[in-house]
Amino acid sequence: MAGYVVRRVLGMVLLLFLLTLTVFFLFNMMPADPARLTCGKACSPAVIEANRHHLELDIPPIEQYQRFVSGIFFGRTFSKDTPRPIECEAPCLGYSFLRNTEVLTLIARAAPVTFWLAIGGFLTWMVVGLTLGIVSALKRGRWIDRTIMGIALIGYSLPSFFIGLVLIFFVILDWNLLPFPQWTTPDKDLGRFVQTMLLPWITIATLYAAFYMRLTRNQVLEIFGEDYIRTARAKGLPERIVVVKHALRAGLTPIVTAAGLDLAGLLGGAIITENIFSLPGLGSLAIGSVLASDLPLITGITLLTAALIIFANLIVDLLYAVIDPRVRVG
Amino acid sequence: MVGRSLRQIVWARLRRDKLAMFCLVVLVIYYMIGIFGPVIGPSLGLDPYAFDRAAISDRGGGPIGDFGGISAKHPLGVEWGTGRDILSQLLWGLRISLVVATSATLLTVTVGVIVGIIAGYARGWADMVIGRIMDLVLAFPFLLIILALSNVMTDRITDLGVPPGNPSRIAYLIIVISSFGWPYLARIVRGQVISLREREFVAAAIAMGSSRRRILFTEILPNLWAPLLVYTTLLLPAYVGTEAALSFLGVGVIPPDTTFGAMLANSVSYFRVVPTYLFIPGTILAILVVSFNLLGDALRDALDPRATH
């Protein structure tokens, strides 16, 4: 087991390194000149040149990359030789000169919105998806199974932005059941928070719930067809033990795997859902940074999001190895 | 009893599945409209680019009449502010959606199959390198990257000789959608190849001194068509949805051309007053995607060797 963990962790470090490299150079080829964005329309070439120097854009890309990576570990200082240098403490993901704020601060400000959106959506789809999936499998071939699978099909066929817009149209505009979404934290105004988040949660959960209904149904059907379940039953184990000790352990692994990765993906920003419901989360921040060509911010968000997924991958793989001993050898 | 090839068995099973056949017909109709609609349309008086000031009000530019200005001349209403015909926009937009989704699917399958076969057959370091690259690609927040690189890459594509404007934007969509989609397919293919390469017919081919290329693409590849067919059928609707989502976010074709996603994005400002702006493109898009998914599911059932009927 120890060898497996070491191998996996080393793999993750390598992947993170490749990730920073790719992201940095991918965005470096964008023609948007960050120096030009630092001052308004009336901007002399001399000022732009000076700003380019402050932004450390006048050094070779490879050196920029080195400073970027060292900034993550040791922090760095921008605009060193000006009267007002900017200290960016480790972990420094960069500095948005457009917004005059550290990238990490901007991300930290938007993160709670995305966090609540992702967690609420996650809980909704897990409960709905697993319950309906199990019901569907147990009632295989009956009308209730067909109905649930029909709902699942429509659920993952409809684009999530269409679901979101339809929800807004009926629930908010037509039936006036909810006020228009306006973000607030749960500790400030719990009622408003729930009213705002209800539709975004449903929008996100619809797509995933549909996937998990099908996944769960397939898992349950497959497991109950296995020989070892028949053996367990044949040797007279009570049904409860068969389900909990034999079926669940084998059947849950793929679901846990998928759930971990999907949650991590969502935490990186649900761009479309946040866009539709005007939630000021990471997704909206990302879109804003793209529209404004705010390179440091785009780089920071992309990097953090991808790192989150790589990290979740590792956790899921390690969990998998704990649950399923065959993995460790492979 | 006469022996039947797998292809015949699958087709026979599929033909008995009424829902699947219905979806197949729907999809054929969609493709026919996508291919011939913009060809025949103009002779029927359809034009997605023509402004019709008479169909919109002078004040505010809203469509005159109920349901977004539905009339004999404009069966699905007109666009706010310009009076352009919605039906025509849908016909022309459907072609773009289908071109993007179909080309991206073909590109994804080609790249995924080649990489997957090589990774599965090669073992050792080549397999590992490809595996790490796939991990890296899958970790990227692809929506964000596609948004961020849209302008730069479209310019690069124009530099390569693709006509500027929307043709370059369409090429960009096809390329980026495929670049983030192939690892899923490559993984499936790799898994299949790993089990196939130990079979006797591969050993026989090696013993006969076949070249590696012959083993990979003549011996192994034909055994993959069943999972590939299913995956392709399910990839198409996913890509139709991706294209719609991207054009909803503003990547992709720009006016005067339009697609489902762009029309739905426009509808946001008006659907309180004109709900048809939301529901007509949305429904047409939904029928397309649902049909693809139903057909893909039916294909998978038909190809399942464990099924007896």
Image: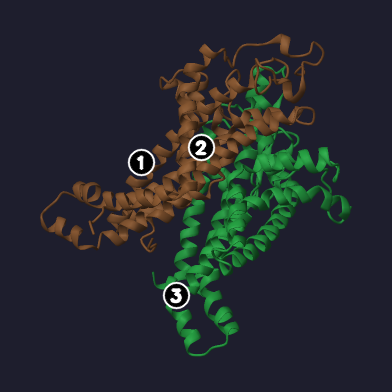
Residue A73 visible in the current orientation: no
- Which quadrant: the N terminus of chain B? bottom left
Residue B83 location (% of width, % of height): 69, 15
Q: CA distance from mark 2 to mark 3?
A: 48 Å
The residues tagged by marks 3 and 1 sit, at their Cα atoms, a distance apart of 36 Å
Q: Are marks 2 and 1 in contact (CB under 8 Å)?
A: no
Are discs 3 and 1 located on one and the same chain?
no
Give the image quarter of residue A299.
top right
Q: Looking at the picture, how far across and down is residue A203, in whole percent?
A: 69, 48
- In the figure, B159 relative to B213: above or below? above
Residue at the image position 63 percent from the left and 31 percent from the top? B281
Residue bearing mark 3: A226
Can marks 2 and 1 be said to lie on one chain? no
The residue carrying mark 2 is A26
Determine the colour of chain B: brown
Chain letter for green?
A
Q: How many marks?
A: 3
- Disc 3: host chain: A
User: Of the residues shown, which amino acid type is indicated by label 1?
Assistant: Thr
Foreground: disc 2 or disc 1: 1
With A72 as the anchor, is B271 left or right in this view? right
Residue A265 lies left or right of residue B124; in this view the side is: right
The residue under label 1 is B110
